[in-house]
Image (spheres, coloured by chain):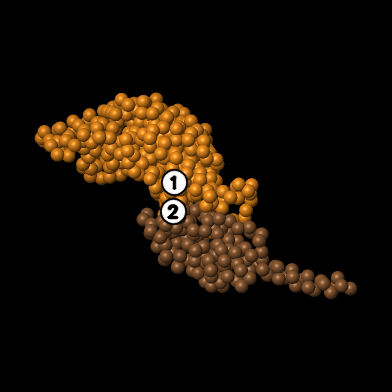
Chain colours: A orange, B brown
Amino acid sequence: MALKFPIYMDNHATTPMDKRVLEAMLPYFTQDFGNAASRTHAYGWHAEAAVEDARETIADYLGAESGKEIVFTSGATESDNLAIKGVAEYYKGKGNHIITTTIEHKAVLDSCKRLEKDGYAVTYVNAGPDGLVNPADIEKAITDKTILVSVMLANNEVGTIQPIGEIGAITRARGVLLHCDAVQGFGKTPFDVRAMNVDLASLTAHKIYGPKGVGALYVRRSKPRVRLVAQMDGGGHERGNRSGTLNVPGIVGFAKAVQIFKQEGVAEANRIRALRDRLHGKINKELDSVFLNGHPEKRLPGNLNLSFSFVEGEGLMMAIKDVAVSSGSACTSASLEPSYVLRSMGLDEELAHSSIRFGLGRFNTEEEVDYVAELVIAKVKRLRELSPLYEMHQQGIDIKSIQWAAH
Amino acid sequence: MAYSEKLLDHYENPRNVGSMDKDDPSVGTGLVGAPACGDVMRLQIRVSPEGVIEDARFKTFGCGSAIASSSLATEWIKGKNINEAATIKNSQIAEELSLPPVKIHCSVLAEDAIKSAIEDYKAKRAARAALNADASVAEPTAAL
């Protein structure tokens, strides 16, 4: 089969929609277009039935007790905002302290920052150099004012999978709620809200080959019953937790995407992991001074975050423009700061600038992996020929011994 | 981000990549930037006794704009007198390559690299002149 360019290897950012998902959604745009909140006619009933089916499918896959625990949202950013701000507001009489980690997604971090401005106290726990959060660090941070702990299931940059079950055992024992931003790990690593004592979980459809613009927040209804203050006011949809007409086609697509993971997820993870390891193996065989970011084993199957020492990330992405990837380099962002995730893991700034994140997914093939490996190897070699740092390295000069003038 | 054709050309086919012997008295070396900032440029010039830049070489660790800016800088300074080369402004480089605002610092770095290489050459020449002057003062003493 001929390769299609650019080859998409940025599946942490978003995923292409599975055609089976699209097919499931299509009728809900046209003939079954009803408003799920319309109680007076069959159009509404039909839409509502589809939404309730979707709730059950998603709840079941999460290990939730019932579909009533699923609140549909516009996506994970909204879910994170609702979970953190909604819990903080409801439980403010109980305490004003929240614990999270420095490697969370901005939707979590910036929600916490907003709460700090409103008088809440937030503790940001650091991850280790492998991106792993130590549950003991969470436990140490808990005070009698702590109401919520928020830790992601898997990191979006380095793919490290967090010990949510261990953290859940701690939060449950201490009577603190646990929110998990499960966006990246959902479907790709085992996740069970009951077994892991998770009280709230953010999900999104577009990372699992579903449509953009639809997500969910799991909100536990018993032992303990979690209460929220809605952040969107209106018609009182979703049991008063999130007003707004439901995105019925999106919700149907979300559930279809989950159903596919239910059936194929394990086999798919194994296939993607093998492709990822093939890519890593080929690169490692041909290039020196390449470092893996994140945990070597506790990692999402499709994640490969590598630092190509002596080569700058954006410069490299320009050279491999036949491949759609992303970089922790400063130059890819407006801020000119390299990835805060890599820096908070203690990664050397030069290596943060040199990082490339490959995110493999359902539709990547072995042929693509082989093409990308060859391309990356050739271009890294070329750019190292251009790199004064690589020349110094070859001459045995320690780059850290040079007094660089920061600019 | 869409880059200009000129920028892409310099990035894909960089001119004057390489190294010169930094201990050669006719060579001036500028090393600017920092790995932690994501850009390091090394620009070297070989200067004739008349002060003309006969050759220029660079190596750059950085993004495409940084590589293109240094490649263009070497092209522009070759054949110029060092005093003339020192007047090249980052804004000229930025304009030639149509650098987007977020990449202007790459052209600043290229200007710094040119200036730094010329300074290094001048400092070496001054040191050599001082050494020669010392030697000429020392001679009569030796003759005694």
Numbered disc in front, either 2 or 1: 2
From the viewer's side, name the closer residue of B10 and B4.
B10
> Visible in this render: residue A122?
no
Q: Residue at x 52, y 36 (%)?
A: A285
Quarter of the view holding residue B143: bottom right
Chain identity of mark 2: B
Seen from the viewer's position, the closer of residues A36 and A144 is: A36
Q: x and y percent of residue A218 in the render?
A: 32, 33
**Residue B74: horizontal and vertical position, in percent?**
51, 62
Residue B129 falls left or right of residue A99: right
Q: Secondary structure at mark 2?
A: helix
Q: Residue at x 49, y 45 (%)?
A: A380
Q: Residue at x 54, y 51 (%)?
A: A387
Residue A73: percent from left, percent from top: 28, 40
Whether discs 2 and 1 lie on one chain: the answer is no
**Disc on res. A375:** none
Residue with the mark numbered 1: A327
Label 2 is placed on what type of residue? Answer: Glu
* Identity of the residue drawn at 52% across and 71% down: B87
The crowding category of the residue bearing disc 1, from other C-alpha atoms within 10 Å (few below 14, some 14 to 19, many at least 20), is many
Q: Which residue is mark 2?
A: B12
Judge whether residue B38 can be spotted in this image.
yes
Q: Which residue is the extreme one toward the left?
A: A41
Please state which amino acid type lies under the numbered disc 1: Ser
Callout 1: SS = strand
